[in-house]
């Protein structure tokens, strides 16, 4: 008797906790795109079907064990089935039932869902390109008002919080915060072109229900249509090296009017930055700006101090390349020079040409030559970087 009470208490506690957590914390995250909603429905249907099959088979098993028990003097069948034809027949029936469930009852919704995921172009309102690299995402708006907007999105959780032995309070969005959010208009169908600059990455926001592998050398597609304004967070979902856990995705879905305001502001910001490339910078300005660029982009591998992590990541302190001449007698930058490395990369060292603007590249190089224990004393102007790109 007491056992039964315990069980029923347990079950009612379980049911109560289910309804208390109806805010999806025990389920899929709240879907905010048609694709996420569809995926959730497919999942629910399949769970119900699997559960029904489970309980039917279990019931037949329990019944068979119970009704044919030894104490009822049940005699086991020792001879064969009535005939081979009968045996084939009763094997084919469950086979046919499962076939019907798989191909029709489960197949149709799954087919519908997959077709929907692959349909990236139909009625798309805008196109963005997402490039994964070790270990950050780059976003580029390809058409419409926002065309030309292009920026890099870096982890912004303070470094000391990820350090070993940190015992302070971590940020609310620890490892899920970036400096530049991807901004999308609510309701627009956004076709996403995805690629990678080095190894495979995967751009994944659980509430969007879409995730696609970013493969170097290939352009792959997916789409999102965010139907609810808000900030959504995700992560890289393909193990991509040392910084795999440090390249989160943050998307702001804004109502259309606010999105337009953001586009205008972002364009102005980018225009200002490229205007900055034409002016003469002082060494102090470049070094100060370069420190920020360095710590955001380069310190993961070369370390904040510039000591690197040899032999994988060389030290910049005392490096021949970092301290060597940049330009040759003809005024062109030298192969294997500091500028060549940063612009074009080599082996594991990424190419920064597409990721950083002229001012950022000039700043970070000037910083590396005059800080981190180096003191070359010269400086590189953004205009020189601009010229070097051509
Ligand atoms: Cu990654």
Image (cartoon, grey):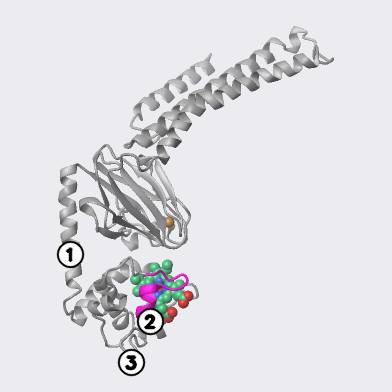
- Pointer 3: residues within 10 angstroms few (<14), some, or many (20+)? few
Magenta residues, as a range? 337-351
State the SS at label 2.
loop
Q: Is residue 367 above or below residue 87?
A: below
Say which quadrant the C terminus sits in: bottom left
Q: Residue at x 28, y 60 (%)?
A: 151
Residue for badge 1: 271
90 relative position to 253: left or right: right
x and y, in percent, of residue 293 in the image: 28, 69
137 relative to 351, above or below: above
Let me know if residue 308 appears in the view. Answer: no
13 vs 312, nearest the viewer: 312
**Label 2 or label 1, whichever comes before in sequence order:** 1
Real-space Cα separation, disc 3 to disc 1, in angstroms: 33 Å
Q: Which mark is residue 329?
A: 3
Q: Quadrant of residue 185?
A: top left
Q: Residue furthest front?
A: 122
Mark in front: 3 vs 2:
3
Q: Which circle's residue, 3 or 1, is located before the other in the chain?
A: 1
Q: Closer to the N terminus: mark 3 or mark 2?
A: 2
Front residue of 30 and 383: 383
Residue 68 versus residue 298 in the image, above or below: above
Nearest to the observer: residue 390 or residue 272: 390
The disc label shown at residue 317, or none: 2
Q: Residues within 10 Å of mark 2 (few under 14, many from 20)?
A: many
Is 197 magenta? The answer is: no
């Amino acid at each position: 008797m007491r056992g039964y009470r315990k069980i029923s208490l347990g079950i009612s506690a379980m049911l109560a906790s289910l309804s208390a957590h109806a805010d999806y914390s025990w389920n899929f995250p709240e879907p905010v795109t048609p694709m996420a909603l569809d995926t959730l429905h497919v999942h629910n249907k399949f769970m119900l079907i699997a559960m029904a099959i489970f309980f039917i088979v279990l019931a037949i098993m329990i019944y068979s064990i119970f009704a044919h028990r030894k104490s009822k003097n049940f005699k086991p069948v020792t001879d064969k089935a009535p005939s081979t034809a009968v045996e084939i027949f009763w094997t084919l029936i469950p086979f046919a039932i499962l076939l019907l469930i798989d191909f029709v009852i489960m197949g149709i919704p799954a087919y519908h869902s997959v077709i929907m995921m692959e349909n990236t172009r139909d009625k798309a309102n805008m196109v963005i390109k997402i490039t994964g690299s070790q270990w950050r995402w780059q976003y580029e708006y390809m058409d419409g008002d926002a065309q030309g907007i292009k920026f890099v999105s870096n982890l912004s959780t303070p470094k000391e919080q990820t350090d070993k032995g940190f015992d302070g309070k971590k940020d609310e969005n620890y490892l899920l915060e970036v400096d530049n959010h991807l901004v999308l208009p609510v309701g627009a169908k956004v076709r996403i072109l995805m690629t990678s600059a080095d190894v495979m990455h995967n751009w994944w926001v659980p509430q969007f229900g879409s995730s696609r592998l970013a493969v170097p050398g290939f352009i792959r597609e997916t789409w999102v249509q965010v139907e609810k304004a808000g900030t959504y967070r995700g992560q890289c979902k393909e193990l991509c090296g040392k910084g795999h856990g440090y390249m989160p995705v943050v998307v702001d879905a804004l109502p259309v009017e606010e999105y337009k305001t953001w586009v205008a502001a972002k364009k102005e910001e980018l225009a200002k930055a490229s205007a900055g490339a034409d002016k003469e910078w002082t060494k102090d300005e470049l070094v100060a700006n370069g420190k920020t660029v360095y710590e955001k982009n380069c310190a993961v591998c070369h370390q904040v101090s510039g000591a690197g992590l040899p032999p994988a990541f060389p030290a910049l302190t005392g490096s021949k390349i970092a301290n060597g001449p940049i330009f040759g007698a003809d005024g062109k930058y030298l192969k294997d020079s500091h500028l060549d490395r940063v612009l074009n990369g080599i082996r594991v060292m990424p190419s920064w040409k597409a990721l950083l603007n002229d001012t950022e590249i000039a700043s970070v190089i000037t910083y590396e030559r005059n800080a981190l224990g180096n003191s070359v004393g010269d400086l590189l102007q953004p205009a020189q970087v601009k010229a070097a790109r051509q």
